[in-house]
Every structure is written in structure tokens, then in C-alpha cells.
Amino acid sequence: MLKKKKKEGDSDNPEVINNVINESEQTNGQDQNQQIAEDENAPSAVDMLKEELSLANDKYLRLYAEFDNFRRRTIKEREEARKMEGKDLIVSLLPVLDDFERALKAMENATDVAPIKEGVTLVQHKLKNTLSQKGLKAMETIGTPFDPELQEAITNIPAPSEDLKGKVIDEMEKGYFLNDKVIRFAKVIVGA
């Protein structure tokens, strides 16, 4: 700007040079005053940081509350699931329970034992079928080699024959698998 004015006016004239300098100082002063006024109206860095902090705290509190609600809801759902986890099995066993009640009523008036025995056998068969549909399977242990991972030895007795040594001779309590996992070990007598 200074160079432009010099070219337009007389470069040797000191008045022209002074006017150009004065004009330049006045416009710079006005710009500075205008910038100071704008800075006073603009929020300070501290105010901006305080606002950001309050927004971050608000977001944190909302996330914390949402997580806490999620945690409570999950605990409640687990509790309800635990209460109802055996529902399917129990519902499938209700007809067997009904059959046992009918058998008890039939025993009160019965004079012949054979029909009662046949009825109880049918109820037992129905119970086994229902449990096997749910994944229960009985272990076959008699005559098999003793396996400590599946069987619990109650006692050892002398084996009646040489081929029964180390094998299961008798079963005191049946063992069971549930979906190929042992849920009860068989209690057996092993030949020595």
C-alpha cells in the first residue's frame, strides 16, 4: 500500500509520505480495536473448556446410567431363566406323575397283584422313555472292565472266574449319562 501511494504521488514530497504513513497507522489501529472488541464478545478458552467438560460429564452419566440399567436387567433375566431352566423336563414328567397317581388309586381297590405290577412296569417304561428323550442314558457296567472315570468301586470281592478279574461283577447303583456327560457315577463291585 505504501508503494502504491508513492507511485501515485510525488515520491520526493515529504507531506505525501507522512499522509500515507498516518493513513496506514489509522487503519491498523481501527483493525486492532475491532479485533479487541470481537475478542471480548467471544467466549474465552476457559469457558469453552468448561462447556466441553460439562458435556463430557453429562455423556458419562448417561452412559453409566444406561450400563447400570443393562446390568440390572441382565441379572433379572438370569434369575428368571434359572427359575425356569428345568421347566421342559418337569412338563414332560407330569404325565408320568399322573400315571403314578392312577396306579396308587388302583392299588387301593385291587385284589389281584398282576395287573398292578403290569401297570407299574408301564409307568416305569414311560418314565425311562421320557428321560431318554431328554438325553438321559444308563451306563452298562456289568461284565465291563473297571473304569474309575465312569465308575466308583464300593468293594472288591474274589472273582468267581479268572476272566472276571478287574471287571465289574455287580452294580449297586446305576450310573447315568446326560448328553454324553456323566451325571452320576455307577457304584460297582469289582472282581479281584
Image (tube, rainbow, N blue to C red):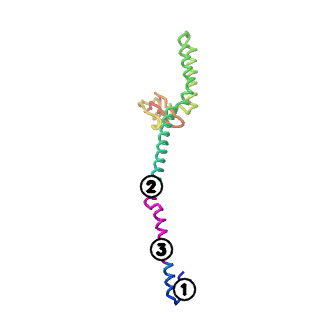
Residue positioned 54% across, 28% down in the render: 90
Mark 3, secondary structure of its residue: helix
Quadrant location of the C terminus?
Answer: top left
Amino acid, disc 2: Leu
Q: Marks 1 and 3, Cα distance to the nearest angstrom?
A: 22 Å
Counting other residues with Cα less than 10 Å from the Cα at mark 3, is it few (<14), some (14-19), or many (20 or more)? Answer: few
Quadrant location of the N terminus?
Answer: bottom right
The answer to which image quadrant residue 93 occupies is top right
User: Magenta stretch: residue 187 in it?
Assistant: no
Q: Marks 1 and 2, Cα distance to the nearest angstrom?
A: 55 Å
Q: Which one is in front, 1 or 55? A: 1
Amino acid, disc 1: Lys
Amino acid, disc 3: Gly
Q: Are marks 1 and 2 in contact (CB under 8 Å)?
A: no
Please name the residue that numbered disc 2 is placed on: 53
Q: Nearer the viewer, mark 1 or mark 2?
A: 1
Counting other residues with Cα less than 10 Å from the Cα at mark 2, is it few (<14), some (14-19), or many (20 or more)? Answer: few
- In the rendered image, residue 152, in percent from the top left (x then y), is placed at 44, 33
Counting other residues with Cα less than 10 Å from the Cα at mark 1, is it few (<14), some (14-19), or many (20 or more)? Answer: some
Is 97 rendered above or below residue 169? above
User: Magenta stretch: residue 37 in it?
Assistant: yes
Q: Mark number for residue 6? A: 1
Residue positioned 50% across, 82% down in the render: 19
Is 185 rendered above or below residue 60? above
- In the rendered image, residue 58, in percent from the top left (x then y), is placed at 47, 50
Q: Which residues are magenta?
A: 25-50
Mark 2, secondary structure of its residue: helix
